[in-house]
Amino acid sequence: MNLTSCFEFIGRASEWFFINVIENLKNMPNLVFIAIGTVTFLIWMWQMAKYNKEAAENGTYK
């Protein structure tokens, strides 16, 4: 087994994955990533508001 056959296998496996899995999911991966990003952003903003409130109470808010 040489390196070329390894790369050909990776290429065939990737092609099969994208044709049979990703194309059938349509837009679902995009929606999942957008939902994860939105939830993460909201958690981050909630934490920042909490830290800013704590800093304002301690007098360390700039």
Image (cartoon, rainbow, N blue to C red):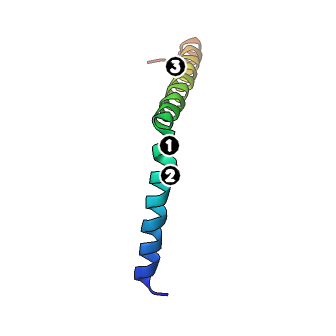
Q: Which one is in front, 33 or 17?
A: 17
Type of residue at label 2? Answer: Asn
Q: Residues within 10 Å of mark 2 (few under 14, many from 20)?
A: few
- State yes or no: discs 2 and 3 in contact (Cβ < 8 Å): no
| Amino acid under disc 1 | Asn
Q: CA distance from mark 1 to mark 3?
A: 53 Å
Task: Tell me residue 26's x, y (percent).
Answer: 46, 37
Q: On the image, numbered disc 2 is attached to which residue?
A: 20
Residue at mark 1: 24
Query: What SS does tag 3 mark?
Result: loop
Q: Is residue 22 above or below residue 30?
A: below
| Disc on the earlier residue, 1 or 3 | 1
Secondary structure beneath label 1: helix
Give percent across and percent down for residue 17: 50, 56
Cα separation between marks 2 and 1: 6 Å
Q: Position of residue 21 (x, y in %)?
A: 52, 49
Q: Residue at x 47, y 30 (%)?
A: 34
What residue is at 57 percent from the left and 24 percent from the top? 43
Answer few, some or many: residues within 10 Å of disc 3's Cα (few below 14, many 20 plus, some between 14 and 19).
few
Secondary structure type for disc 2: helix
Asked if residue 18 is positioned above or below residue 7 in the image, the reply reads above
Q: Amino acid at mark 3?
A: Thr
Mark in front: 1 vs 3:
1
Q: Position of residue 61 (x, y in %)?
A: 49, 17
Q: Which residue is mark 3?
A: 60
| Discs 2, 1 touching: Cβ within 8 Å | yes
Q: How many marks?
A: 3
Q: CA distance from mark 2 to mark 3?
A: 55 Å
* Residue at the image position 48 percent from the left and 59 percent from the top: 16
* Mark earlier in primary sequence (2, 3): 2
Decide: few, some or many residues near mark 1? Use Cα within 10 Å; few <14, some 14-19, many ≥20.
few
Of badges 2 and 3, the one in the foreground is 2
